[in-house]
Each structure stands twice: as C-alpha cells, then as structure tokens.
Amino acid sequence: MERLLITGAAGGLGQMLRGRLSHLAPILRLADIAAAADPAPNEEIVQCDLADEEAVFRMVEGCDGIVHLGGISVERSFELIEAANLRGVYHLYEAARAHGLPRIIFASSNHTIGFYPQDQRLHADDPVRPDGLYGVSKVFGEAMARMYYEKFGQETAIVRIGSCTPAPRDWRMLSTWFSHDDFVSLIETVFRVPRLGCPIVWGASANDAGWWDNSASGYLGWVPRDNAAAYRALIETQVPRPSADAPVARYQGGTFTADPIHRGPIPDPEDAG
Ligand code: NAI
Ligand code: 15L
C-alpha cells in the first residue's frame, strides 16, 4: 500500500492505531470530524464529516486501504447516528467504489448481538440481536459491506470489536477484551492475505471466558495472542462482582441493553456543573 486511510483517527482507537500502523504504508491519511494533532512527516490530516458525501470522496481518493473507525461509538440519538453511521457508511462505500475498491476494515461492534445471553456461544452467522440504535447502525454497516462485496467485489473485514482497551477493566471484559496488540495483528493480517472476501471476524483476544467462535474466518490465519484471564485475579480482588440479574452480567452487550432510546441531545457529563 502507498497510502492507508484511518477514519475516526482522533478517537480512542484511532490515536492508538496511528502510532502502530505506520509500517503498513509510507503515508497514513488521518481523517476525523474533529481537529487532529500535528501531523508527523508520514501523516496527512484530513478534517471530514462522514455525512458530507463530497468530502468523503476527497478523503478516500488515492488510498489503497481503509481502517474505518469513524462514527458514533456509543448509544446516541437517531439523528447523530444516522449522519455518521448510516449516511457516513454509505458515503464511504460509494467513495471506495469510485476510487478502485481499496480493502476496508469496518469497525463493527459486539452491540450487533448485544441481547444474547452471556452463557451462549456465538458463531459469525448467528442472527443479529442489536441492543440499541448504535447496534442497529453497525448491523446496517455490516449489510452495506456485504452488499458491496456481492455486487462489486469490494473486500471488507467486518470486525465485531468487543472491548478494545489497554487491559480488561471489569468482569464482562474477561470475555469481551480485545487487546491493542491483537487488533494490530488482525489489521496486519487483513492487509496481507491474498484473498480477504467479506468475513465477519470477532474482534476479541483469546480469552478463556470468551463467547465468540472465529472458526468461520479461520482461513485468514489470524490468531489472537492475549488472554484476559491474565487479569482475572486482579479483577476478582479489585472490582465488585455485579449481581447475576444486572444487564452487565446477563447480556453480552452489557449495560447498552439498558440504555434508553435517546431523543434529542445528551448532555455532556463534563458540562454538568
Ligand atoms: P471514539 O468515539 O473514540 O472515536 C470515533 C471517532 O469518530 C471520533 O474521533 C469522532 O470525532 C469521529 N466521528 C464521529 N462522528 C463523525 C463524523 N460525522 N464524521 C467524521 N468523524 C466522526 O471511538 P473508538 O473507541 O475509538 O472506536 C472506534 C470505532 O470502533 C468506532 O466505530 C466504534 O463504534 C468501534 N468500536 C469500538 C470499540 C471499543 O472497544 N473501543 C468496541 C466496538 C466497536
Ligand atoms: C462499543 O461498541 C463501544 O464503542 C465501546 O466504547 C465499548 O463500550 C464497547 O463497545 C464494549 O461493549 O465494551
């Protein structure tokens, strides 16, 4: 690849990956609606609202691979989700079609299946059970990826990310944790394999307590190395165990299953007094 595009580059995962993917292409194009920090010599900064189709076409032009992280990443109002995660994904796929079908990694989420109980092991082809508007928007993105694959041969790795954090922080993350190293190695694999197709890959580490079976995407040869079990003793001693009937202990999507449908803006906790 000559140029790799990372959308959502100003966000949590974007900032982490910005520093860890520079070996994949001489130029990293970092895009976000938010202003980004100063570019390094190998970086191009593009400020772009995913809801703006022309801007998305300019953002994608000249890129040979895309890590699509941009969008609303938690439960929000339909209006916010629609702009970034519905229109934004459509714009991204149309731009990719116009600019040579660069391989895409689509950051989907465990919230596409959040209403499954935690004692059920899932495969990639199990029916979706989204736990909110955010989860529904990721189902939409997955369907968009699949349709562009069937119609135009656009390859995408649909990565249903669990909880991608430096370390697991709570009991649920003993099952959902996706280490930064494992995410990086998955991205390396996706851009290395001769044939990608359009697999759904569970974005999770090799957690002893994991719920998700990645055998359907085994042909990629990607093997996660980390295991949240290494943090179990720490969590058991430092994090109170939630009661068995709490959403965070019942459902794979945890607390998202209990979120309301937000109508109108949600106050930013930092603005409250
Ligand atoms: P984040 O919220 O920190 O970053 C998302 C970025 O997208 C932000 O920088 C934001 O400014 C940008 N963005 C929002 N609306 C936009 C718009 N209209 N146009 C352009 N950019 C826009 O999220 P995070 O944690 O970095 O996650 C990255 C991706 O991975 C998201 O798509 C999220 O849904 C997905 N994901 C993340 C998980 C995690 O554990 N961090 C778990 C499951 C999925
Ligand atoms: C997600 O989809 C969110 O983007 C992230 O902030 C976490 O909440 C994660 O899921 C999770 O379920 O832990």
Image (spheres, helix red, strand yellow):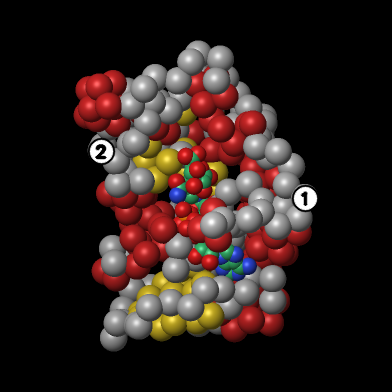
Residue 225 badge: 2
- Sequence-wise, the earlier of marks 1 and 2 is 2
The residue that appears at 34% across and 67% down in the rendered structure is: 18
Judge: label 2 CB < 8 Å from ligand 1.
Answer: no
The residue drawn where x is 43% and y is 77% is 36
Q: Please state, as top left, top right, bottom left or bottom right, where the N terminus lies in the image.
A: bottom left
Q: Is residue 178 left or right of residue 260?
A: left
Circle 2 packing at 10 Å, graded few (<14), some (14-19), many (20+), is few
The image quarter containing residue 169 is: top left
- Percent x, y of residue 234: 23, 27
The x, y position of residue 87, in whole percent, is 72, 64
Estimate the x, y position of residue 39 in percent, counting from the top left.
Answer: 35, 82
Identify the mark at residue 263; answer none if there is no mark: 1
The correct choice, above or below, for 157 with respect to 240 in the image is below
Q: In this view, does 212 lie above or below 203?
A: above
Quadrant of the image containing the C terminus:
bottom right
Q: Is residue 4 left or right of residue 86?
A: left
